[in-house]
Image (cartoon, rainbow, N blue to C red):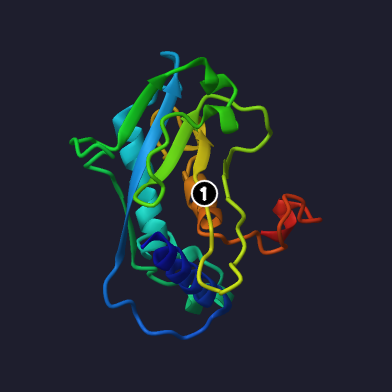
Amino acid sequence: TQRTLIKALYILLVAFAVGWCIPAIAQPYTIPVVFHVLHQGGDENMSDAQIIDAMRILNEDFNRGNVDIASVAPAYQNNIADMEITFRLANIDPNGNLTNGIDRIYSSLTYVGGPSARLNEWDRSRYMNIWVVANQRATYSGYPYIAGATISSDSSFFACGDLMVFHYYLGSIGTSSYQLGRQLTHEIGHYLCLLHPWGNTINPGVTCTESD
């Protein structure tokens, strides 16, 4: 079930983050993903190839497939892990029809973003929804919708939501302006209920150029 999956993934991510030694997962998790591309025929209507490239980067990041692993600081080398999580574009839509996992929607809301732009949401118990927009009324490059990201009273469920990203932070080709294309990896960490290392805020209190 979704509850069991989210709880298991959360425990695994926290465990690897703090360096716990835990046994390997018997069977990797596969998470179906749908991209809802909101556009009005401009650059925000990026190619399928750019979305596929973003998925490639995402899976490399979560499965220790990065070509730049050697550049990780020595102090963190022992914490690098294969999370055994595979993200794949959905091939069956909620109605049982074949799909490529890319849902293109012509809408002016691509220039607004935010909750109102979460059009045609697919069942989140079966899919990870990612909306891609041209702009939004915020200064962030992307963000997750975390639906009360807190543990339940019986410690059985971590409730998370969906994601929204700018098209120019998606992947490393096409309209992307971010060379490594890791923004989606960052936001999916939040999707899985992980906060920033400094806590539940976007203000770390230090400059990123000094603290990374």
Q: Position of residue 147 (x, y in %)?
A: 58, 51
Residue 1 image-quadrant placement: bottom left
Q: Position of residue 207 (x, y in %)?
A: 76, 52
157 horizontally vs 99: left or right? right
Q: Position of residue 107 (x, y in %)?
A: 47, 17
Residue in front for this viewpoint, 22 or 146: 146
Q: Position of residue 159 (x, y in %)?
A: 53, 58
Residue in front for this viewpoint, 119 or 195: 119
Identify the residue at image location x=42%, y=58%.
61
Residue in front for this viewpoint, 131 or 179: 131
Mark 1 neighbour density, 10 Å: few (under 14) some (14–19) many (20 or more): many
Identify the residue at image location x=39%, y=29%.
174
Reply above or below: 120 against 82: above
Identify the residue at image location x=46%, y=34%.
131
Q: Residue furthest left?
A: 98
Q: Amino acid at mark 1?
A: Gly
- Residue 40 seen in this snapshot: yes
207 horizontally vs 132: left or right? right
Reply above or below: 201 against 43: below
- Residue 177 seen in this snapshot: no
Reply above or below: 166 against 62: above
Identify the residue at image location x=27%, y=44%.
90
Q: Residue furthest right?
A: 205
Q: Which residue is mark 1?
A: 161
Quarter of the image where the C terminus is located? bottom right
Residue 59 image-quadrant placement: bottom left
**Which secondary structure, mark 1?**
loop
Reply above or below: 153 against 115: below
127 horizontally vs 187: left or right? left
